Amino acid sequence: SSNQRQLTAGMERVRPRPRLELAVGGIGRPSVVLGQHNQHNQQQQQHQQLMPAVGKLLLPDDATERQFSVDDLEDLGEIGRGAFGAVNRMRYTPTGVVLAVKRIRSTVDERQQKNMLLELNVVVNCQCEFIARSYGALFKEGDCWICMELMDTSLDKFYRIVYHHLHEAIPEVVIARIALATVSALDYLKEKLGMMHRDVKPSNILADRRGRVKLCDFGIAGKLVDSIAKTRDAGCRPYMAPERIDHQRMTEGYDVRSDVWSLGISLYELCTGRFPYRQWGTMFEQLEQVVKSDPPRLTDIRYSEEARSFANLCLTKDVKKRPKYRQLLQHPFLLESAALDADADIAAYFCSVLNRTPEEAQLADLLAAVHKVILCLTKAAVPSSRMADPSGASANTAATAGSAFVEGIGSEVVVCLFILLAGLILVAAWLSTYVPQDMRPIAVFVFENFGRYRPGEQQQQPQQVATAPLPPAAITGPAPIPTAAAEAPSASTATTETPSSSASPSSDTARIATPPSDSARIATEPATVPDAAADAGDTTAIDTPAAAAAVTTDLAAYDVDVLESDGDLDPEMRERVEDVLNEYTQVMEAKNDSELRNRRLKYFNCLLTQPADSDASASVASTSGAGTGAAASPVSASDTPASAVVVGSEAASSSILESSSAMPSAAPAATVDTASAAAPTSSATASSSRPPGSLLLRLKYFNDDLRTVVALPNESIANFKRKHFQVEMSRNMNIRLIYNGRELKEGTDCTLASYAIPEEATIHCLITERNTSANEESGAAAASGGGGGAAEGDGVGPLEGQGDIGSYMFPLFGGILGIIWYCRVCYKAYFNFMSTMALGAVTLLFFAAFFASWSARPPRQTGQIHVHRINLDAQQQQQQQQQDQQA
Ligand SMILES: Nc1ncnc2c1ncn2[C@@H]1O[C@H](COP(=O)(O)OP(=O)(O)OP(=O)(O)O)[C@@H](O)[C@H]1O
């Protein structure tokens, strides 16, 4: 702060204030103004005498000097700021040449100004390829403006990009080039101009994209540094040699070898990316470090022995033993560099670093921030005894070597931390599959996206369900559309009895009643085919013409529509859903097509019973006011549907045929709810007991020859509205029914019930690919084994099962690779070429495997199948017309 005061005082002393300049015209205090003005003019004259080059500009392409003033310079913005002023990019407007203009505040006394200008006068004319050219200088309001050759960057900025943003190290060949250029420039200064620099540091070494490295700021700043060496701000780094700081040594004086020390410090910084001394404490304490502690030692194994010995030679504390420039120029490190024709390489390297896009820089900054946090953690994790303090009293070779070691340890700690974190995330994700449904989305996201789903679904319990295969006989001819359904006064019977010609009580239908397999097919429909059901012995009894008629009738009564759900359902999926529905129709129409029948059609079907109607409880008969009543009336346990609409596969037909009369008492209670059990044998009674508007939603599915009915617990309409059913189909089209946060399993905790639902019902379902051959196998295994473990890919439903370790592999390997790459970026030096290539190859393999598996993964999408009723009035009218015509 005292320095700042000093600087400010100096500026005020020299600079005329604008207010005072105005006073020349008679305003203000003339005496003061004139006094200051005179003083300024005097200084200008002095400058002109001391430095003939002032006000003249000698540009590289010009043969003669030009007179120039501040008006000829157009400011293009600040490049940087130093202790004594700012450096701006400026265009010399007459020629358009862009220059770097260093504006040194006139804060020094007369004597120092004299020295500065004299030296500037000398260096303006110096010709050395390693010294940034000065083209001329001028004074403005006491400030000295020095026009210099514009370079692309200074090495302080450069090494920060390399180490702190890119997390790389400057290659040795570049370090050698920098050392060579700096020593050559210093040597030139001394030999040709009889000067020393006095302020060698990375910010005074400039570089450009052409690979040129140049020293700047010589002579001028050097004088200033001398004068305020002991009063500099604590933030400034002490590049000064010990003999310049230590009074006792100062008595012996110092020479160019002080600049050699500064060069050593600069090289250390460029090789390690950090200043060798501690940066905290007062300036005095920092300087004390330099004087009292052992000199820093470059031990970084990234650099060759020559490089290290060169830097360490420059950092010889005893000035007498420290080499001079000539000696340094003979050092193998510089000799090798001089012999190398690596200009192109160096230019390319500077370009590669300086041409990073802003996005890359931003990303690099982000990484740097993360890196910093991790390093802090690392430092906290590593015992302090192991942390080297290269700048402290104990700073010696071993300690500095320890520093590199600690960085290595750091990387290990980082790896451990990351692995721990990755493990925790995995465990959390795994555990989250057991948390309530509401909290599962995260787990779903994680596992769905990493292919956790496997072929095979929740196993059915063979002992709980019928496993009779579908005999070919079960599928009969196409079901005629019943027209009598609407006419039937007793709706429930009318629906199924309509095509009386085909309603023969076949053996198929007789099988319905056969317990226990049929028990799974819980009878819910009111007396649709009671006769058939009575002697049904096989589940395939569903395919009686009567049943088919009922189904088709019901289908005809409803319009099945597939809607997009929040944009989820893409056209492809939509098509697939439509396929399912079409296929259903096909099944209905081609009952005798054994090929079709043998296909494992496993879609869900839902039965939406129509509201009971006083006139007609048959499916198509009851139409008006259906939904409204339903919405208002909770369903009692005795509710049974009046009729049904089936959307889905052939399974639907069975459900239609499962009449309440066929609902045997032998049916296991587990699979039959109270409603069903209590359902009256008379369909008429059943339908009438059902509140108007109530609908039955029943889901059932086939698993090969395994037939199961999944039904829903009884709930009120309010609950139904609130909680959606979620139907999921896996790859092999098995269905999982999620309701109220848990999976419903047939025959266990599910009971059959009817629901009072509104006219329209939306079933959220997830439809996956049809059977693949693999799925067929797994499905078969599931059917036969009844339990198939997770390892076989069976029996594991989505979000369930603990096996399937393969699912974790992607995130696990991905995480580990990420960690390794991170470490590779942070600690590049520890990875040699081969390990980098190996890592790259493994990464590529990983990604290839990942994408292969990803692309092979069956599409899974959620969508909605929206089932809603069509205008039954219109249909009734149509039927009426038909009847009229017939009549
Ligand atoms: N000729 C130049 N071309 C391009 N950039 C330059 C040039 N000269 C200086 N700079 C930039 O301007 C910044 C400020 O330079 P300046 O010499 O004023 O301060 P410094 O060297 O950083 O510190 P100090 O004032 O202590 O010497 C430098 O860090 C450098 O990045």
Image (tube, rainbow, N blue to C red):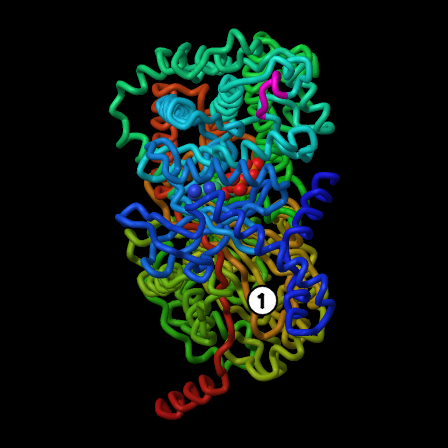
Residue 348 relative to residue 155: left or right: left
Residue 232 relative to residue 855: left or right: right
The residue that appears at 57% across and 31% down in the rendered structure is 422
Identify the residue under disc 1. 526
SS state under label 1: loop
* Residue range (magenta): 239-244
Q: Residues within 10 Å of mark 1 (few under 14, many from 20)?
A: many
Residue 367 visible in the current orientation: no
The residue that appears at 36% across and 25% down in the rendered structure is 177
Residue 790 placed where, x, y %? 50, 31
The residue that appears at 47% across and 61% down in the rendered structure is 568
Residue 479 relative to residue 685: left or right: left
Residue 519 placed where, x, y %? 57, 49
Residue 242 on the magenta span: yes
> Toward which corner of the image does residue 545 lie, by quadrant?
bottom left
Residue 445 placed where, x, y %? 54, 46
> Toward which corner of the image does residue 418 lie, by quadrant?
top right
